[in-house]
Image (spheres, rainbow, N blue to C red):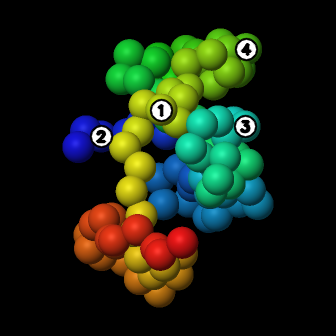
Amino acid sequence: GAPMFFAALGQYPIDDGEEREGDGLVIITQPSDGDMLAIHDRQPVVLPPDAARRWIDPDLTSAQAEELAQTQGLTADAFTWHPVSKAVGNVKHDSSELIQPIAPPEP
């Protein structure tokens, strides 16, 4: 129910300038743990609010960013897990209904 702060790196044109090679965004990941292992072997680095504030500090060094990503990412048990529709995995779908819980699949 609260915002999530993903550790990410981005490079974008400045002041409507031309796009450069490498422009875009990447989400930093870490090895999965807990219930996330059943879904994927990697999970996004989700930072608590105080670490997220440090992450976006323009004076943050590369070494400090690396330490934040390696030590401050929330573990899978910090989240609530529930089944969702398979439409979640299709980029053609984009609606708030995608995150609504569905009945667990029959074993």
The image shows residue 87, relative to residue 44, as above or below, that is below
Q: Which residue is under mark 2?
A: 3
Residue 80 higher or lower than 77, as above or below: below
Q: Residue at x 63, y 16 (%)?
A: 71
Where disc 1 sits, the SS reads: helix
Q: Measuring 43% from the left and 31% from the top, which residue is drawn there? A: 78
The quarter of the picture where the C terminus appears is bottom right
Separation of marks 1 and 3 at Cα, in angstroms: 14 Å
Q: Secondary structure at mark 2?
A: loop
Q: Amino acid at mark 3?
A: Pro
Asked if the residues shown at circle 1 and circle 4 are in contact, with their CB atoms under 8 angstroms apart, the answer is: no
Residue at x-position 26% and y-position 73%: 97
Task: Tell me the amino acid under the disc marked 1.
Answer: Asp
Mark 1 or mark 3, which has the lower sequence index?
Answer: 3
Q: Position of residue 15 (x, y in %)?
A: 47, 53
Numbered badge on residue 77: 1
Q: In 3D space, how far apart are the residues under numbered discs 1 and 2 (Cα atoms)? A: 16 Å
Residue pushed farthest bottom?
A: 92
